[in-house]
Image: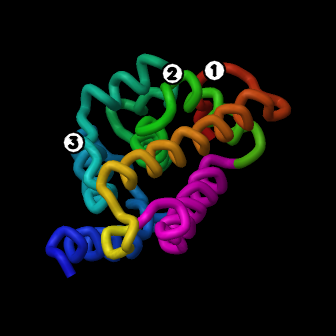
Amino acid sequence: MPTQTIDFQTWLSKLQTLQLPLWNDFPDFDLYMEQLVSLVNQYLAPLELDPVTPAMINNYVKHKVMFKPVKKRYQREHLAAVITLTLLKTVFPLDMIRSGFTGELNALSAQAAYDRFATNFTTQLQSLQLAQTVPLPFSNDFTWDAAVQQTAVTTIIYQLISKHLIRHAPNQKKGAIAHD
């Protein structure tokens, strides 16, 4: 088996072991900005995303995607919001995320909404059957270009479906996430 195939399989296997933390896994005390950034980056490190920065978090507050810290201290709601935002912003603009957050928090508590997202993300990741959506490096018909194109197409399709669901969900209101 070629080295690239082994590296891809190793990466995919490692990725599929990731479990996003649930609400009760979060610290039960307020955090300062640097602690929040460090914890979020630690939780999401296996995904190899760009690291979260204080400027990003300040931008989320400025654009009213999440509420302001209380006396420069961040709570579980902030931690949940930043983890979720970091993942969602890989495919959605902030205004779409804000709308989705608002809809979720109209129906659920911050804890229930986050735990549902984290559980869904973890379940989907762990049950990923990549061979159904993209030819894998060990298959006879594999090419890197075809694999990139197929995953991009799949991402676009699911993004379009998600945007439609967010836009047409009942009781959608615009605005910032309210503090529970």
| Marked residue nearer the N-terminal end (1 or 2) | 2
Q: Are marks 3 and 2 in contact (CB under 8 Å)?
A: no
Question: Which residue is pictured at 49% across the width and 73% down the height?
Answer: 126
Is residue 127 a member of the stretch shown in magenta? yes
Q: Amino acid at mark 2?
A: Lys
**Gap in angstroms between the C-alphas marked 1 and 3:** 27 Å
Mark 3 neighbour density, 10 Å: few (under 14) some (14–19) many (20 or more): few
Decide which of tag 3 and tag 2 comes sooner along the chain: 3
Give the spatial CA distance, label 3 vs label 2. Answer: 20 Å
In this figure, which residue is indicated by the disc labeled 2? 64
Report the magenta stretch's main SS: helix
Looking at the image, residue 30 lies above or below residue 11: above
Q: Are marks 1 and 2 in contact (CB under 8 Å)?
A: yes
Pointer 1: what residue?
175
* Number of other residues with Cα within 10 Å of mark 2, as a class: few under 14, some 14 to 19, many 20 or more: some
57 relative to 132 in the view: left or right: left
Extreme residue in the bottom direction: 1
Q: In the rendering, which numbered label is found on residue 34?
A: 3
Q: Nearer the viewer, residue 16 or 122?
A: 16
